[in-house]
Image: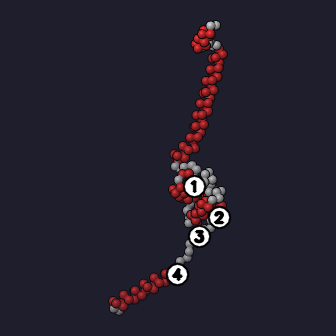
């Protein structure tokens, strides 16, 4: 066979293989069925970026319905709960999770209120203790002040 015939035969075979491969239908990847419970399990951990102190699972706004649908699509595409939460934090900020994802900021946000309460209680106890000491000193040492003495002297007593 001549070189030209061999090349033509190779080209025909290549076209046939490519045509057969493209003629086969590619089976669609099965879409995972996501339940409302799975969506709400993630939505209850996220706060509505529009409303205040309302989680996505209970918010009735159209924006929250869209975000719940977006969570459903992300779950169907194979994203994990952590990836979905991180995506919402990246787009809307830490306010959507209630507590920051950064461990240092999370610890500070959870411990700081307790430190403030403890400080207020210690300050209140110190004030009460000083008042009690002041009352007992006034009863034990009933000396008159210099102003009272001067006032009585001016009155002529």
Could you tell me how far apart the alpha carbons at marks 4 and 1 are, in whole angstroms?
Answer: 46 Å
Q: Secondary structure at mark 3?
A: loop
**Outermost left residue:** 3
**Front one among 60 and 91:** 60
What's the residue at 60%, 27% (across, down)? Answer: 126
Q: Is tag 4's residue or tag 3's residue first in the polypeptide sequence?
A: 4
**Outermost front residue:** 155
* Mark 2 lies on residue: 35
Mark 2 or mark 1, which is nearer to you? 1
- The x and y percentages for residue 33 are 62, 67
Residue 99 position (above or below residue 143): below
**Outermost bottom residue:** 1
Q: How many marks?
A: 4
What's the residue at 58%, 63% (across, down)? Answer: 70
Give neighbour class at mark 3: few <14, some 14-19, many 20+ (Cα, 10 Å). Answer: few
Disc marking residue 49: 1
Residue 37 position (above or below residue 132): below
* Mark 4 lies on residue: 24
- The x and y percentages for residue 25 are 53, 80
What's the residue at 57%, 58% (across, down)? Answer: 81
């Amino acid at each position: 066979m001549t070189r030209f015939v061999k090349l033509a035969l190779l080209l025909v075979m290549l076209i046939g293989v490519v045509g057969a491969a493209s003629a086969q239908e590619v089976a669609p990847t099965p879409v995972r069925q996501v339940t409302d419970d799975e969506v709400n399990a993630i939505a209850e951990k996220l706060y509505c970026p529009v409303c205040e102190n309302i989680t996505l699972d209970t918010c009735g706004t159209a924006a929250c319905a869209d975000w719940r649908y977006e969570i459903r699509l992300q779950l169907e595409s194979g994203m994990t709960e952590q990836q979905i939460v991180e995506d919402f934090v990246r787009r809307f900020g830490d306010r959507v999770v209630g507590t920051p994802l950064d461990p240092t900021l999370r610890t500070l946000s959870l411990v700081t209120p307790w430190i403030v309460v403890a400080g207020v209680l210690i300050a209140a106890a110190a004030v009460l203790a000083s008042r009690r000491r002041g009352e007992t000193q006034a009863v034990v040492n009933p000396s008159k002040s210099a102003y009272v003495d001067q006032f009585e002297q001016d009155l002529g007593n």
